[in-house]
Image: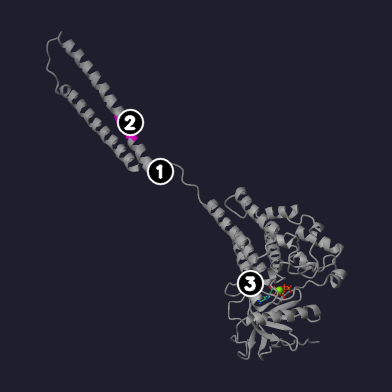
């Protein structure tokens, strides 16, 4: 029996219709699916983007009531933010699907998220530096959201659900944040934890005070925790891929690994999820509340292995120490002890980027060619010349002395013999020797003056 294929068309509130763009595979999230679509029927209302432009349609997974509430909240924040003409911290919203409840959001298409981007880059020689610089940019984005948008529009100032799949890169390379609105952490007593022992979706990135529904004295510290946890996950992903080439998964897109810090938090949570509801977290309840446990410290040390292809240990160690400081601070259980502003965290990532650049420049610099500078070589050459000339002069002097002795002996012998005519060559010999000696002395003088002038110039 033939199976009918339903045409996939969605109608926006603007009246425009949206159809899937060929070649784009749906991207599945925890509670929704994002499809690449194009609009049809001409620009209408806020959906003023030309036909054929790729757009993202985020659709509710039917049946999940919590996800539907969440989509309403996301739509509310996106409408609010997209009404601004300023550069937005999120993908621009073009249309809404569904009435009276929103079941789909039509927004700017972002080709990659932070995790996909990192998978492409992580094997490159300068990958670590690029990640640090990107984290700094993303933190600035979060800070823009906290400072300008959240304060101005009266929205709660923490994003609450930052993680690599909610950090998107727009087609022009801007880093943007998505999924503003209430985070997905259910109330402790009606949490799916009770039945499934799984904390919905975000447990690897969610700050402990949000998980426990405890007091949140520093909303920005919810996000700095998540950003630092995201950075840890990406560094860990690099290690896993470079060492084993395989990333263990738990049936979702997200790699299966967990910080020891998160294990500790979940252990306390599983003993009694309601213990800190609407109260401050009690730091005493957690092991190592102000610094990361040993297992995570070792993982961080491992994560920087090989980040400087040219050099070794000491540069890696310098980066490890800075990184550890950032992680200890960023994932302290006590929110007051954390980065309470995303700008401060951005500055820490910028500091790491600079240090990385500095150390990689030092390690890439080729060792200077061994041997003396050209001036030194010239002085050495002139000195050698002078020594050779001196030796030649001494040898000529010795020859001259020998010749004189021979001559005197010859004269003495002649006095006892009848005189014989002196051969012309013998007469000329002493004159030639004196001339050669004079030329060599002259050479010696010239070399001496040359050395003197050169040393004077160098001084
Ligand atoms: N505007 C967009 N353009 C392109 N891809 C997007 C866009 N918004 C989200 N995505 C991607 O679609 C996928 C699903 O997004 P979605 O927000 O539904 O799920 P998620 O972020 O993985 O989890 P969560 O439901 O907790 O947010 C993710 O990989 C996300 O990066
Ligand atoms: Mg998302």
Foreground pick, 295 / 379:
295
Q: Is residue 399 left or right of residue 153?
A: left
- Decide: is 321 above or below 457: below
Which mark, by number, is residue 272?
none
Q: Nearer the viewer, residue 78 or 235?
A: 78
The residue wearing badge 1 is: 373
Q: Nearer the viewer, residue 419 or 315?
A: 315
Rounded to the nearest angstrom, the CA distance separating label 2 from label 3 is 78 Å
Quadrant containing ligand 2: bottom right
Q: Residues within 10 Å of mark 2 (few under 14, many from 20)?
A: some
Residue depicted at x 57% and y 74%:
172
| Dot 2 beta carbon under 8 Å from ligand 1 | no
Specify whether residue 385 is painted magenta: yes
Region rendered in magenta: 383-389
Res. 22 visible in picture: no
Q: Main secondary structure of the magenta part?
A: helix
For the residues labelled 2 and 3, say whether their Cβ atoms are less than 8 Å apart: no
Q: Is residue 14 visible?
A: yes
N-terminal of the pair, mark 2 or mark 1, is: 1
Q: Is residue 54 above or below residue 442?
A: below
Q: Per the image, is 193 magenta?
A: no
């Amino acid at each position: 029996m033939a199976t009918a294929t339903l045409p996939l068309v969605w109608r926006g509130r603007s009246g425009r219709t949206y159809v899937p763009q060929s070649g784009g595979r749906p991207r599945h999230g925890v509670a929704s699916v994002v499809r690449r679509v194009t609009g049809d029927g001409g620009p209408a209302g806020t959906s003023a983007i030309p036909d054929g432009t790729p757009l993202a349609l985020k659709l509710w997974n039917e049946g999940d009531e919590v996800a539907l509430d969440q989509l309403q909240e996301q739509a509310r924040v996106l409408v609010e933010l997209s009404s601004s003409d300023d550069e937005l911290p999120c993908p621009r919203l073009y249309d809404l699907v569904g009435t009276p409840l929103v079941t789909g959001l039509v927004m700017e298409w972002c080709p990659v998220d932070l995790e996909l981007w990192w998978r492409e880059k992580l094997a490159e020689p300068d990958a670590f530096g690029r990640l640090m610089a990107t984290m700094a940019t993303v933190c600035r984005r979060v800070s823009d959201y906290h400072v300008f948008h959240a304060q101005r529009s009266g929205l709660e100032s923490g994003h609450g659900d930052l993680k690599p799949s909610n950090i998107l890169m727009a087609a022009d390379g801007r880093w943007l944040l998505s999924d503003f609105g209430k985070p997905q952490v259910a109330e402790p007593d009606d949490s799916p934890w009770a039945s499934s022992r799984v904390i919905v979706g975000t447990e690897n990135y969610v700050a402990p005070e949000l998980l426990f529904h405890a007091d949140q004295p520093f909303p920005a510290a919810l996000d700095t925790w998540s950003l630092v946890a995201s950075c840890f996950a990406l560094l860990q992903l690099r290690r896993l891929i470079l060492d084993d080439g395989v990333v263990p998964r738990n049936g979702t897109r997200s790699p299966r690994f967990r910080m020891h810090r998160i294990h500790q938090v979940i252990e306390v949570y599983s003993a009694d999820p309601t213990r800190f509801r609407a109260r401050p977290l009690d730091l005493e309840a957690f092991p190592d509340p102000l610094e990361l446990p040993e297992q995570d410290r070792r993982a961080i040390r491992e994560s920087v292995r090989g980040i400087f292809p040219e050099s070794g240990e000491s540069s890696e160690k310098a980066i490890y120490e800075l990184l550890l400081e950032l992680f200890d601070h960023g994932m302290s259980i006590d929110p007051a002890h954390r980065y309470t502003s995303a700008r401060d965290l951005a500055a820490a990532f910028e500091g790491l980027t600079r240090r990385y650049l500095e150390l990689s420049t030092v390690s890439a610099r080729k060792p200077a060619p061994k041997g003396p500078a050209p001036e030194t070589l010239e002085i050495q050459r002139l000195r050698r010349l002078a020594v050779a000339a001196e030796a030649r002069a001494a040898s000529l002097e010795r020859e001259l002395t020998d010749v004189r002795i021979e001559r005197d002996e010859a004269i003495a012998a002649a006095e006892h013999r009848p005189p014989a005519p002196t051969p012309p060559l013998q007469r000329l010999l002493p004159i030639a020797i004196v001339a050669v000696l004079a030329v060599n002395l002259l050479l010696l003088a010239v070399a001496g003056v040359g050395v003197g002038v050169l040393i004077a110039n160098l001084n």
